[in-house]
């Protein structure tokens, strides 16, 4: 199921950069802020933002971070700053903030739920930090989610790394992101690193958490778009298709707009009539 991207990287690169520039001009902002994780998505997103000529702030936000991830992020930022004069760098170490938070909330007896909640808390602390930097500089928060993660399996934190102002690479598959990374000359150490969300303070990979590689999940996403069903597959393909469908279903709450309770018109009319009646009684 190895997936090779077929996109025209040069045209895609220029299209996204132009889109970012136009969006920033219309929004009347000074630039972009990007959280740097040492991963392929944030490296590509920050490079695209840097190409716009607008100020681009790369923020490191370690929380008990794996040293390899930290070093890859630093390598990328150093390279980006050497290539683009509009790129700046900030470090906000959130480890102490995270530890204080942990000490103030109850611990769950369910270890899985507890650890996952803390992992999502890391992402939400980072989102808050990025919006602080955006606020004081007049920047937009650029998201780093790609298509298969955001709209396929929903592998991101709601109001964490999913809380952004705009998403430059959200219509690119992971394989497309890798192809673009090579074109953009993202450091080799990042291009060859196994994707990881870095939310658990260790080196566990996305594939270990998801149960399938991104190549496999992209394949499944395409098969779903062809209206295939699980009965069409056998062996590993059937297993991957099932994983994709399960994650896609479970994470629809992230992909869909927030549900709004729509009031029936007859109730609204009754409420307005009641207010008018009370008002008239008051006048009498």
Image: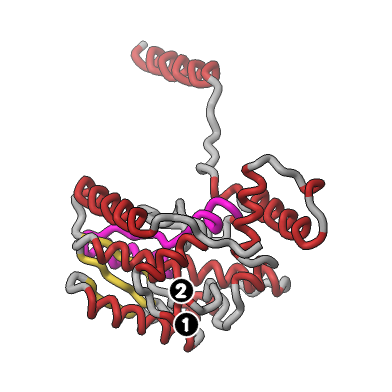
Residue 119, horizontal then vertical, whole percent: 56, 71
Label 1 secondary element? helix
Point 70% across, 51% down: residue: 245
Quadrant of the drawing holding the C terminus: top left
**Image height of 126 relative to 138, above or below:** below
Asked if the residue at tag 1 contacts the one at tag 2, i.e. Cβ–Cβ closer than 8 Å, the answer is yes
Whole-Å distance between the Cαs marked 2 and 1?
7 Å
The disc placed on residue 39 is 2
Magenta stretch, residue numbers: 125-152
* Disc 1 target residue: 69
Point 28% across, 67% down: residue: 133
**Image height of 259 relative to 8, above or below:** above
Residue 277, horizontal then vertical, whole percent: 44, 14
Residue 133 forms part of the magenta stretch: yes
Answer few, some or many: residues within 10 Å of disc 1's Cα (few below 14, many 20 plus, some between 14 and 19).
Answer: many
Answer few, some or many: residues within 10 Å of disc 2's Cα (few below 14, many 20 plus, some between 14 and 19).
Answer: many
Q: Which residue is at the front of the view, 247 or 18?
A: 18
Q: Is residue 228 left or right of residue 264?
A: right
Q: Is residue 272 left or right of residue 197?
A: left
Asked whether the viewer can see residue 174, the reply is no
Asked whether the viewer can see residue 127, the reply is yes
Q: Is residue 11 left or right of residue 214?
A: left
**Image height of 49 relative to 108, above or below:** above
């Amino acid at each position: 199921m190895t997936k090779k991207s077929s996109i025209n990287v040069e045209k895609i690169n220029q299209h996204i950069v132009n889109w970012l520039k136009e969006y920033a001009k219309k929004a009347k902002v000074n630039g972009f802020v990007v959280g740097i994780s040492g991963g392929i998505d944030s490296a590509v997103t920050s490079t695209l933002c840097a190409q716009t000529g607008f100020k681009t702030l790369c923020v490191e936000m370690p929380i008990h971070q794996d040293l390899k991830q930290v070093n890859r992020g630093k390598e990328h930022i150093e390279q980006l700053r050497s290539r683009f004069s509009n790129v700046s760098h900030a470090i906000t170490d959130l480890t102490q903030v995270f530890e204080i938070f942990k000490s103030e909330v109850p611990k769950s007896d369910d270890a899985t739920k507890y650890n996952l909640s803390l992992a999502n808390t890391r992402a939400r602390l980072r989102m808050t930090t990025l919006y602080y930097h955006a606020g004081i500089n007049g920047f937009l928060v650029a998201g780093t989610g790609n298509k298969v993660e955001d709209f396929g399996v929903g592998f991101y934190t709601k109001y964490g790394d999913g809380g952004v102002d705009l998403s430059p690479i959200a219509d690119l598959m992971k394989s497309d992101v890798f192809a673009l990374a090579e074109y953009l000359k993202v450091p080799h150490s990042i291009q060859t690193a196994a994707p990881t969300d870095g939310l658990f303070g260790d080196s566990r990979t996305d594939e270990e958490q998801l149960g399938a590689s991104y190549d496999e999940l992209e394949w499944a996403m395409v098969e779903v778009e062809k209206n295939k069903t699980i009965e069409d597959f056998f062996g590993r393909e059937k297993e991957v298709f099932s994983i994709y469908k399960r994650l896609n279903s479970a994470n629809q709450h992230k992909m869909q707009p927030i549900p709004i309770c729509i009031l029936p018109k007859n109730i609204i009319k009754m409420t307005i009539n009641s207010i008018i009646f009370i008002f008239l009684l008051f006048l009498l």
